[in-house]
Amino acid sequence: MSDPLGQTRIGAAGVKVRRLGFGSAPLGGLLRETPEADAIDAVHAALAVGLDYFDVAPQYGGGMAEQRLGMALRDTPRDRVVISSKVGKLIRPLPRNAKPATSGFTGAPAHEIIYDYSYDGVFQSLEDSFR
């Protein structure tokens, strides 16, 4: 029987992932609020069926998707998954009564997005995502 999730390579580096990946925008409340426990359960369910590629971005819920993905994968061996993210959008918290800058993400903490595609901005974005 063939493997419907067969592997493919990403880019010149030759990183191998399953053909089907997990888009994590809903973990950050895309279009509707997603309880934290449901978000973590969804990642665990994806792992259980063999998914190994997770796509995330700081903009998804003002960093909430990255945080939840990190919590869900905390005990997963690093060589078991591939994670892609985006750079150039720095997320900065705002007072609780302020409105989040990211539209379409329900339940996101109040934040602003600072666009910075400079050398320093790219590395700051990457460092923030690692956190």
Image (cartoon, grey):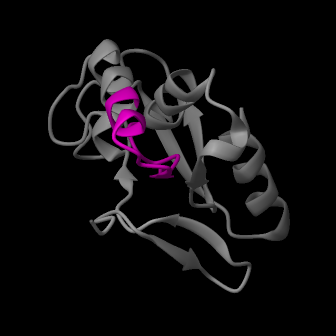
Find the residue positioned furthest to the left: 32
Q: Residue drawn at (20%, 26%), measured in percent from left and top?
A: 33
Front-most of residues 38 and 48:
48
Residue 20 in the image: state x and y as whole percent.
34, 62
Q: Residue drawn at (23%, 31%), measured in percent from left and top?
A: 106
Residue 39 in the image: state x and y as whole percent.
33, 25
Asked if residue 99 can be seen in this view, the reply is: no
Asked if residue 79 can be seen in this view, the reply is: yes
Find the residue positioned furthest to the right: 120
- The answer to whether residue 44 is above or below residue 88 is above
Residue 78 in the image: state x and y as whole percent.
71, 39
Front-most of residues 81 and 83:
81
Front-most of residues 34 and 41:
41
Find the residue positioned furthest to the bottom: 12
Q: Is residue 56 magenta?
A: yes
Which residues are drawn in magenta?
44-61
Q: Is residue 20 magenta?
A: no
Q: Residue drawn at (39%, 32%), measured in percent from left and top?
A: 43
Question: In the drawing, does residue 57 fall left or right of residue 32?
Answer: right
- The answer to whether residue 7 is above or below residue 45 is below
Q: Residue drawn at (27%, 24%), measured in percent from left and top?
A: 107
